[in-house]
Amino acid sequence: MQVTHKNGLEMESRETSFNQLWNRYASYWPWFVFLLLLAIGGACLYMRYSIPQYESTARLLIKDEKKGVEDSKGLESLNLISTKKILENEMEVLQSRTLVKEVVNNLELYAPVYEERRIHSWLESNKWLSNNALANWFTKKGVAPGGLPAYTTSPVIIKAKSPDSLTETKKVPFGYNKEEKKVVIGTDSYPINEWVQTPYGTLQFMPNPRLKDSAYVPAGQFYFTLQEPKKVIANIQDRLVIASASKLSSILNLTIQDEVPERGEDILNELLTQYNVAMLKDKNTLAANTLRFVEDRLNHVSRDLTGIEHKIEQYKSSQAAVDVSEQGKLFLENVSANDQKLGEIDMKLAALDQVERYVKQKDNNSSIAPSTLGVSDPVLSNMLDKLYELELEYEKKKGTTGEGNPLMSSVTDQINRIKPGILENIQNQRRGLQASRGNLASTNNSYTSVLQTIPKKERDLIEISRQQSTMQSIYAFLLQKKEETALSYAANVSDSRVVDRASTTVKPVSPKAPIVFAIAVITALAIGVVWITLKEIFNKKIMYRQDIERLTSHPVIAEISIDKSKNPVVIGGPNSRSFVAEQFRKLRVALNYLGVNTTNKKVLVTSSIAGEGKSFIATNLALSMALTGKKVVLLEMDLHSPAISEYLNINSEVGISNYLLGTREPEEIIKRSDVNDNLFIIPAGPLSANPTEILMNNRLPELLTYLDGIFDYIIIDTAPVGPVTDAYIISPYCDATLYVIRHRHTPKIMVEQIDKISKVNSLKNMAIVFNGIRPKGFGRHHYGYGYGYGDGYAYKENRKMKKQKTSFKPI
């Protein structure tokens, strides 16, 4: 009879995903312990021999036009060329290749000095270890990566005459002779403070000004390396972090991490110094250009003014001292102010012409930047400042990278984009100034009509005096600007101020032990999980209960652990309390979910292939049911490879095959067991040449009908369904089927076929028994789900079972 599986069975066959994962991975705990010990050991070695990193920090105040940092009023009135800075631009300038290159060259960072340190120096003193190839390798390679920086312990520093031409040199050991003050490289010696030719280039060895302890004795030999400056520059740029202190602040925090605290501080301090030098140099260049422009104009106006004064003297001498009347004086007063405005406009137009010529030049990078003294438009002034900055950057990069470098192309593109905007602005400014000049010229024409009413001699004198007045006004204006520019030049100050010079943290910021050990532990666990997962993905055998549940819809009603005693009978008596015996009792109870009872009593036990333990399951299930006081008969119907008779050491000369061939009757083949009076067995009998065919005669249902009237339960052990069809022949006469799957033995592909087998060749009311599970891990984690019961009795009961003998006798 087919019985529908109830929710209780389904709930029992499922557990939470967490428990499944825990049971899966916890069973490999020795592997995880090994990986954790290995990872923690590696982390300890890393912490022991890695060179700590220290963090140095400096603070710089920038006069930012967007954040309101101003000069003092006294300096603001003098500093005509002071330009406000944009904080974001200055952050880029501080990280620029040009500034960092100055730092690298000034601190000789392209030629670092190291001190060798042996990791396993004790290997050399051990005779056995010293002959070990691996030990020799460690001895040779037993130097901390990069050596130990000798920035403050080396007696000398190395300076290259042409740093840009250096070729990378990995390691150059050297010694220092204090008495002779010479550096020894191999067999050659070189004096200090002199340029010397070496195999590595023209170098100068100088006393180390940073040497803290002149009496320091190194544990290993000193050596230096030579690096290409561009690589050192890139390394510093990668490590240098510049950020604003806050959104509303114009203070920049400069941070760098370095193996040597003093070197990190020197890098930041030198960077700030070079930044201020560069800023002052740019401002002085602009101030010098402005002063030169004013002086040129003064010389020109001075010559014109001298000529006019000489002309007035000649005119008065030739015309007998003509004086200007009151009407003439009134004219001069009215026209002088107008002429002064015209002079200012002419000067502005001249400044625009000069700027326009500069911008239109194809190659103005080497030209002197024009003065912006006459430029009053702030937009044009800002655009010109940006152009000057780009051209200065172009000149600096041109000397270090070459014109074909992509960085040069980027700067050139920016220059070419800004020039059209400047030229357009100049045209707009020129049109406005020319319109103003036209208006002033019209006003002068109206004054000229008044001049016609004055006598000719007086009129000529007024014209000359008018020119003199105009030139005097322009000269006075230029003289004032010259003094202001000179004062500004002399009082020129940087647009930045160092708030805090570089300082370094007392404790290293890297490596941090908690992070290193956390990464080591996580890595070890990850490697373990990945390895186990890959191992199981490529494993073709059934490993876990969830593998079965994933591959088939039939429920797993029991898990049977492997019995290490190798005794096929694990239930030795009514008081047996071994762990496996408890699992069989649970299987006995689970049969109720399949509807097995004294009415529906016939249970078929089969499997996919040989060796899965179906005979073991059938034998111990029958004995477990007999312990309840019910009469149970066990049929050995695997006529191809019977095993129960061999397990129980009984005579199999007469059995089922004799009955099926018609040579024996049922009562002649049934035998009683000495283990329990309620357990009976029918052995297979002699092997037949065609066991499948003899199962198909009418005597099989007659035998089962006969047994049905005598026994409470009938357990049938039959052949596997993979190689033969015996189970399909017997299944229609049974009420339930137990399908045995063995851990690490049953192929997954066979389990995948179970659902198809059930549809085509029905195995009635089928459920699965997961057999041969190996307990592993802490607290007996299983490849199944486990029940966690009976562990405490296993050893004691198994010892009793070994002493107990099993025998059967005919009834």
Image (cartoon, grey):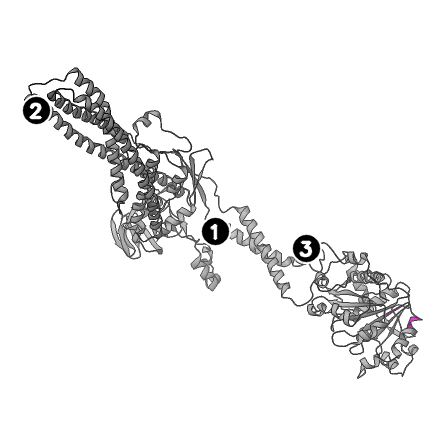
Give the secondary structure at mark 2.
helix
The answer to which image quadrant residue 540 occupies is: bottom right
Q: Amino acid at mark 3?
A: Trp
Q: Residue at x 7, y 21 (%)?
A: 319
Residue 286 locus on image (x, y percent): 28, 36
Camera-nearest label, 3 or 1 = 3
713 in magenta? yes
Q: Amino acid at mark 2?
A: Gln
Residue 22 locus on image (x, y percent): 68, 55
Q: Residues within 10 Å of mark 2 (few under 14, many from 20)?
A: few
The answer to which image quadrant residue 283 occupies is: top left
- Residue farthest right in this picture: 709
Is residue 98 shown above or below 371? below
Upstream in sequence: badge 3 or badge 1: 3
The answer to which image quadrant residue 423 occupies is: top left
Left or right? Give the position of 243 relative to 282: right
Residue hosting label 1? 49
Residue hosting label 2? 314
Residue 478 locus on image (x, y percent): 22, 28
Give the secondary structure at mark 3.
helix
Upstream in sequence: badge 1 or badge 2: 1
Q: Amino acid at mark 1?
A: Tyr
Q: Looking at the figure, which quarter contains the N terminus?
A: bottom right
- First to last magenta residue range: 707-714
